[in-house]
Image (tube, rainbow, N blue to C red):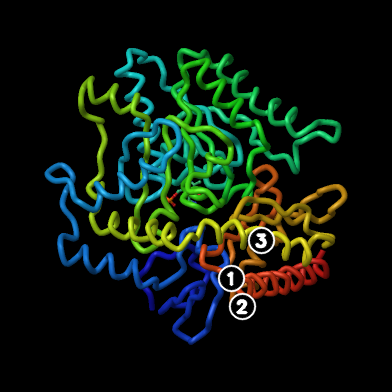
Amino acid sequence: MSFVFPRHSKASYPVAVGGEGPYLFDSAGKRYIDASGGAAVSCLGHGHPAVIQAIKDQVDKIAYAHSAFFTTEASEALAEYLIERAPGDLARVYFVSGGSEANETALKLARQFHLENGEPDRYHFIARQQSYHGNTLGALSVGGNAARRAPYQPLLSPASHIEPCYAYRHQAHDESEEAYGRRVADSLEAEILRVGPEKVAAFIAEPVVGATLGAVPAVSGYFKRIREICDQYGVLLILDEVMCGMGRTGSLYACEQDGIAPDILTCAKGLGGGYQPIGAVLCSGRIYDTIAQGSGAFEHGFTYIGHATACAAALAVQQTIEAENLLDNVQRQGAALREALEARFGNHHHVGDIRGRGLFIGLELVADRTTKEPFDPALKVNALIKKQAMAEGMVCYPAGGTVDGRRGDHVLLAPSFIVQRPHLDEIVDKLGRAVDSVLAEVGSAA
Ligand code: PMP
């Protein structure tokens, strides 16, 4: 008998009772290798003593103090850490409790900036299809994840969606990567002109699209062109690094690898590594100063802004990653994982594409590798793989709707930054067995 409202009423979930490094343990004593950190969260693995100690130390001092009355050493220190390493002129940090709150905050911040900057007509947001920005209504309105939006369509505020940068499916055979990147980036300009440049508040995008597309980075040059277009039309650029940020792709901020900086950047998941719920919104000095020298108050706020224990945990996570040079390990093990996946699946008839950056890797599954035809969604290939991987003793993050929100399947891998070669071998081996056994089952059913 359970009183918890679960994710799915027909699923039964094992009880997680422990974790150590890249492994999780359930109450039956079964061990799982955590190949996706849940949903790209547990970047330091489980049970890290330095983070546990930092949480204990903070709770001993002050667990929480409301940000309308106090600031805390923990939130000040974490903000300084993030800004010292941030790209461009990101200058201030607004702490929240997760990714949806971060994006909700980013949208409202963009809106209030324009109001205080004397452009009250700028309230329209442009985003991309096949993206995900969170489940709160504002974040869901800009998100392009068709399945998650569908039940709430009447409640969503208007936003427009341009095509994603998704080379595997949309780059033409006779088109260079640069030409493709330019073509899709230019669709932002077309949309701004269609809506009316004086009405557009911001463009929001994930530098590497996570849950919805399965670790798809933009092609080179795409985000440089996006940055140019935003600047030309006075449109703010919001980069959602909730999943791909905080070292996941091998650099602290994912956009460093695209050679651009946003006006607003959101992060969460890997910021606290799951040790505490925390998200953050970084904004440029220009945005902060406009509000600071205008009304002085961002008309927003949550009870747990800058939660001291969450900030202390996140700072310990980030300091550990830096002290142990774990971003080097992300790059090294990321390349090794890609190689091992290529060796295992490179010629697999049903693996169409292996892509990603650092330890953020996606495999797109197809019914036919030559035509890229996806599986019939009714077969629920991604759900079967998730289940089979759990049975094999592995947590990975498969999802569906990759192609158009309805069709397509992928598996997302996002292991912790501490993984070593034997962990990668275990991941590839278990994934191989899960994929092969599901495809054998589906093949015989089809
Ligand atoms: N943005 C992105 C890119 C995400 O991947 C997610 C979570 N999957 C969110 C926003 C929402 O974050 P949360 O679930 O912490 O609210």
Report the Cα–Cα distance between label 3 and label 1: 26 Å
Q: Nearer the viewer, mark 2 or mark 1?
A: 1
Q: At label 3, which amino acid type do we have?
A: Asn
277 versus 6 height, above or below:
above
Residue 422's place in the image compared with 208, above or below, is below
The residue drawn where x is 47% and y is 73% is 21
> 222 or 318, which is in the foreground?
318
Q: Please report whichever mark, 3 or 1, sits nearer to the chain's N-terminal start.
A: 3
Residue 443 image offset from top left, x and y in percent? 82, 67
Residue 348 is left or right of residue 207, and the answer is right
Label 2: which secondary element: helix
**Quarter holding residue 324:** bottom left
Alpha-carbon distance for marks 3 and 2?
A: 14 Å
Element type at mark 1:
loop
Q: Residue tagged by mark 3?
A: 382
Mark 3: secondary structure: helix
| Residue 191 position in % (x across, y down) | 59, 20
Picture quarter containing residue 201?
A: top left
Disc 1 marks a residue whose amino acid type is: Gln
Where is residue 402? Give x, y as percent: 67, 48
Residue at left 53%, top 53%?
248
Local packing at callout 3 (Cα closer than 10 Å; few below 14, some 14-19, many 20+) is: many
Q: Which residue is mark 1?
A: 420
Q: CA distance from mark 2 to mark 1?
A: 23 Å
Q: Answer with left or right where residue 62 lies relative to residue 265.
A: left
Asked if residue 398 shows in the view, the reply is: no
Residue 391: assigned label: 2
